[in-house]
Amino acid sequence: MPFINTQEENLKLAKNTISSLFFYCNFYYFFETDYFNAVHLNNYFLHFWFIANLVQFYIIYPVIFIFSLKISKNFCVTILLTVTIFSFFLAQMGGNLSFKYPFFESKIFFNYVAPWAYFLPFTRIWVFLLGGLIYFTKNNNNQNHSWVYTVLSFFLFSFSLYYINSDHPYPSYLIFPIVIFFYFVVKKLNSNSSLIVFLKNKILVFIGVASYSIYLIHYPLILILREYFPTNIVIMFLITLFIFSICFIFHKKLESKIRPKCNFINISSMYIIIVFICIFLLYDNSISKTAGNVGFINGQIEAEIASEYFNKNQTNDFNNELNKTKLLIIGDSYASDFLNCLTQLSILDKIQVSTFRIPANCGNLYVKSDLTKYIKEKHIASCCNIGWYSSSVLLDRIRSADYIVLASLWKKWQIPFFQESFNNLKSITSAEVLFLGPKCFGDIKIDNINPTKNTLNIQNKILEKNRYVNNKMKQIIPANSFVDTQSCFLDDFGTVPIFTDNGNLISYDGQHLTNKGAKYFGRKLINSHSNLNFLNFE
């Protein structure tokens, strides 16, 4: 609400509202930052990306359909089929495309879904167009074969429920089973089949009729309710019932009455009112909501800037003529945080720094073993194109560096490879190789945090998996090559601080550091570990 948000939050709310109103929010969220980024967790319009996709499709599709159909039915089918195939391969293999010459990755994978494929229309339109092609097929409601199609439909639906998840790339060929399922339902099953009878159940029909209302308001309700209720099974079940009840009331009392009266004047009036509200939000100078909420937004922005700076340093080659220590930092967002620590402590002008990003999903390991068996299917192609330590540029920098810092979200499956990775690095360089142990500040609920005299001393329980990996690394990696970050912050009770000594938030999500947190973290780390003395200029 405008009177309890900061000016920055109101600006973001206004932009989100306008992009949703004019159905381009899927593009806006993508170009603003990664769609699944934590900065969107409090965005009440996040789910409108799908409605934007639908509207964009309904603008493009009729134009293609009408003009091609005027020429001939066969021409129309050919055009639809061509666009469908192109869109499918763009979705399935779009990750192979690059914005730099030669515009393709070095290794081509069939199963390489690009990050932008999830929510942009170019890679979604093939699913909608399949429905258009199905329109041209003949109905064949054969009573004798109905049971076969019912069984196949159940199998296909079950297959989709099992395989369409976060471990597999999407949208991809995995959508085909669910498309075929709907094809059977629409074209092959007769009205007396058990599946059709089930789908015609009054409750399911009403849910289908009210589905638009459910989709519109379920997400904002979830965001609001999660702030006031704990997340256990009973509470979640009751919240689900409550949300469905509100959605049904919304549909019955509002949507069903407004929809028949929708005309250009009514819709235009509604848009004008909302746009004026957005303008008010854009210029509203309001008070702060909570310091925690501000800390989250600012921290997220700071982390993104640090990540961009880390990426820019990937092009830096070492200059042997400069009489400065050569530091190579390899890793993921943890490595970005470490570089930001040096930035906040004003150390970068005293040393040479080069960076190389290896995402957390891939594993920051220099080994001969095949690591793809440990990586989620949707990340395999991108990891293979990064190539881990196969880059000749990276290997040259490893050989010429004075110090190499490895900082990543270390995981349990990587433990057996630490020794081999360390040995392989030492075999090609005389540089000091340093592994930074897992960084974790516990599970931070940012909206519940407000730095006051009563909360500054709050300690957060560190995640057990981080402690486990840290202890294993301490056992495997030589002491002069391991930086135990947890020892700087962990007390006897297994807890870590949330705020710096000056009351600034260290991390906005338990993993990534704010700028003040980076300065605090970096200073404690450098002062506590002799391995990092080369960075101590105080």
Image: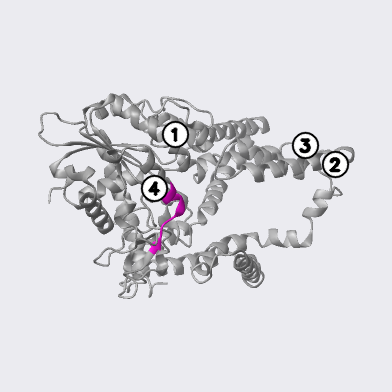
Q: Is residue 265 visible?
A: no
**Residue to which mark 3 is pinned:** 138
- Indicate whether 302 appears above or below 105: below
| Residue at left offset 43%, top offset 64% | 445
Label 4: element kind: helix
- Indicate whether 204 appears above or below 3: above
How crowded pointer 2 is (Cα within 10 Å; few <14, some 14-19, many 20+) is rated as: some
Check contact, mark 4 vs mark 2: CB within 8 A. Answer: no
Magenta range is 460-468
| Residue at left offset 54%, top offset 52% | 50
Looking at marks 1 and 3 on the same chain, the residue that comes earlier in the sequence is marked by: 3
- Indicate whether 516 appears above or below 84: below
- Foreground residue among 448 and 241: 448
Marks 1 and 4, how far apart at CA: 20 Å
Label 2: element kind: helix
**Residue to which mark 1 is pinned:** 382
Looking at marks 3 and 2 on the same chain, the residue that comes earlier in the sequence is marked by: 3
Marks 4 and 2, how far apart at CA: 48 Å
**Residue to which mark 4 is pinned:** 31
How crowded pointer 1 is (Cα within 10 Å; few <14, some 14-19, many 20+) is rated as: many
How is colour applied across the structure in the image? one colour
Q: Quadrant of residue 290?
A: bottom left
